[in-house]
Structures are given as C-alpha cells and as structure tokens.
Image (cartoon, rainbow, N blue to C red):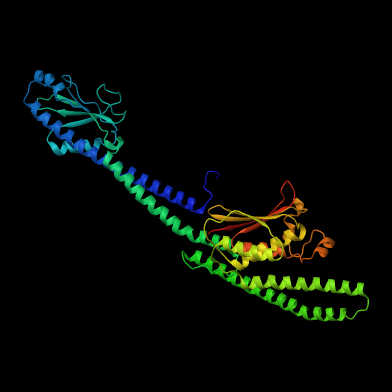
Amino acid sequence: MRLMPRSLFARLACLLVAAVAVALAASTWLMHRDRGEQYLRSRIEFNAHRLTDLARWYDSLGRAERERLAPLVSLPGLRIRLAAPGLRPPEREFLPPGAQWLEQALHDADPQRSVELHRIERQPPDLDAPPGRRVQVWLRLADGDWMVAQVRLTGGGHAPPPPPFLGQLAATLAAVLLVALIAARSMTRPLDQLADAADALGRDLKRPPLTLRGAQEVQRVAQAFNRMQAQLLEHLDTRIKLLAAMSHDLKTPITRLKLRAELLDEDEVREKFIRDLDEMQALVQETLAYLRDEVAGVSPELCDLNSLLDAWLADRAELGQQPQRHGQAQRPLRTAPAALRRIVDNLLDNAYRYAPGDVSLTLHDEGDSVTLSIRDHGPGIPAEQLERVFEPFYRLDSSRNRSLGGSGLGLTIARHLAHQLGGSLRLDSPAEGGLCAVVCLPRR
C-alpha cells in the first residue's frame, strides 16, 4: 500500500494502465499461441509430404543407394535413416501432442502406405526439441524395408514475436494508455475543482456556485456543496444583520448618556463617564465597519500599487506621520483598493499607537506575489501572543490599551480583508525588537 500513489488521478491511471497491460499481454499470449499452433500444423504437413515423397523415391532405389542418400536428404528437425533388415517398429504407445496431426497428414498424403509412430525418450544429437516432443516415423517401403524419420514436433509458439508485431503492439499500448489517462483526468478534474472551491469558500462565501458537470455522483456532490454554501451564506447574513442592528441601536443610548454626562457637576466623574462612553462608541463604530465589510465583500480591479501607496502616505503626512517607504511594485496588481487601504491604515494605526517613533513600509515584488511589510520599533508582542492578537476584542494589556485607544478589532479586520483578497497577514517579532506586520497578496 505504501507504493500506491496518493492522488486519485494517479491511482485511477495506474489501475487503468495495469488493466490494459494485462489485457494486452493476455491477448498477445493467446494470439502468439494460436500462431505457434498454426505454424506447427503447417510444419507437420510439410514434413508429412516430404516423408511420403521420399518414401516414393526410395521405392525405386536399392538399399545401398538409400543409405548413401539418407544423410543428404535430412533436414533440421527431420533426420532420415533406414531400419536394420528384419527390424520391426516398436509397439505403439502414448504419443505427444501434435503426433496425431502428423499421423493424419501422412495418411492423407499416401493412404496406401503403412505408417507407425513411436515416441523418442532420449535426445538425438541433431534434434533440439525438448523431451516428449519428438517422434519416430516408420514408413514401410515397397520391398518391405522401413524408412525411419526422427521428427521434431515443436512449432513457433516459443519463438519471440517478429519486430513489426512488437511495434504494432507498442503503438496500440501507447494509444490505449493515452485514452486511459485522459479518461482518468476527466473523472478526477471535477473533484479537483470541488477541492479548490472548498478552499476558496473560507475566503469568500459569495463566490459563484459550482458548475454541475462530470459523472452523476460528482454532480450530486457539487449540488450538496452549493446547497451548503447557500445555507452558510444565509446563516451568516442573518447573524450579521442582527449584530449590525444591535450595534446601530446602541448608538442612540450612548449619545443620550454622553449628553447626560455633560450635566454632571463633578469634573473628574464627568470626564471618566465621557471617556468610557467614547470608548463604547468607538467599539460600536468598529463593529459596524467590520460587519459592513462582511456584507459588502471586495471587488478586485487592476491597480497601480505604487501610486496608491504614495497617495495614502501623503494623507498620513498631513497627520504628521511620515513612515519610510522602500521598494517598488514591478507591474500592476489586481486587488481591491478600498480593502487594501483599510489593511494598511489599520496596521499603520497600530504601529504609531504603540511605537510613535520610526515606522517603515517596505514593498517587495516577488513576481507571482507582492509582500507589504510594516515595521515599527515599539515594545513588540511576545511570540506566544502573535496569533491571539488577531482574535476579536483581544487585548494584550487592557489597561494600557484603554489609555492608548483602540477597540481590539483592527488586526481582526485587517486579516479578514487580507483573506478576502486571497492573501495572508502575519506578525513577526524581529530579533532586534519591535514588530513587523507582513501582508502577502498573490497576483492570480
């Protein structure tokens, strides 16, 4: 089992190739066996006619002439000699396969002549047939003497096929294998498309449904997948609308509470109330923005990434923030500008919130993908917390974050948008300190 390939396409291809190879091998063996049988029959008929012709010729010769000519008329696999005077054929016994054909052929060639066949057990020096495949043929001559012929009964069944036949067999095998590979690919391609659709479903629930094609079982799987996608989309849409409505309804009581907080006489208490209410309002706004992104999705288009970054950094310069930019994109990138700006803004906000000093933005074009890195020299994040900070509303230090602002949704929104763009977002902790946020966007 460990030698079996892992992919379904490879397994189907191997099974089809093995089945075709076995079928061709069996058919070739059967054909070669039949060809050998036909060759054996034709060889036996040739030997039978030659023996009867020799017997007729020997009838007109004397014994001395017969013995002198015997070595000259012998052929490979057909040795001729004269039996000693008075010697009779041995008793008939069980003959090897093919001997009956020879006996019948001799009788058909010369019905009036007496013929006896005897099995040879020892190997004559000039016969290369295996034991049990040689016979002695005794033909009675006109004067009563016996002409003895040692005949080989092996045919062409053990000989290798001729080269033209092997070439035709190889061409047939190649053609059948090509058809088998195409058939296996046509059966597994819908499964590959289903796997790609399942992988893309995690990034975009609103992707187009699968096209129903292929075998009936594959179409049923595609239909079930499309139904699951529709149910997930409906379920998520209901939850998003419910949360959006709740978050929107919270804006009104928060506003009333802020107005009432202004009426408080004690300045310290009033400031604490207003600060808490501002934080609640920011949290509601971030939640609404996150839900709007879930509902709206992204609309990719071909963009000049260098121009977009220049424009966004110019807006940052008006706020007194001047991150250092490095690198250039070699060609346009298909992406959603609004979603990408949201990612960059959230990462820059985090960088300047916790590390107001030196912040750099590096663009690296790798051909099939574009990597955008935002580096700061702040306190950084412990390695065991690098993934947890992407959880919604998670804060490393609630008291510190409360003083610095933020809702705990910035990184969550940024990673979610990166996934919708088909890319990824990760955080690295450089050895020299600080934090580096890396956004990787594919060009496909």
Q: Quadrant of residue 397?
A: bottom right
Up the image or down, 116 lies above or below 83; here it is below
Assign the N terminus to one quadrant of the image. top right
Residue 21 shown left or right of residue 166 in the figure: right
Q: For this rendering, which residue is in front, 343 or 383?
A: 343
Q: For this rendering, which residue is in front, 241 or 297?
A: 297
**Image coords of residue 66 (percent x, y):** 11, 21
Q: Quadrant of residue 255?
A: bottom right
Which residue is farthest right? 266
Residue 163 shown left or right of residue 201 in the figure: left
**Image coords of residue 217 (percent x, y):** 50, 64
Residue 363 shown left or right of residue 43 in the figure: right
Answer whether residue 291 is visible to the viewer in this image.
yes
Answer whether residue 103 is visible to the viewer in this image.
no
Q: Residue at x 77, y 62 (%)?
A: 394
**Image coords of residue 160 (percent x, y):** 30, 36
**Image coords of residue 292 (percent x, y):** 66, 73
Q: For this rendering, which residue is in front, 321 or 267?
A: 321
Up the image or down, 212 lies above or below 83; here it is below
Which residue is farthest left? 60
Q: Quadrant of residue 243?
A: bottom right
The mark tally for this picture is: 0
Q: For this rendering, which residue is in front, 13 or 146?
A: 13
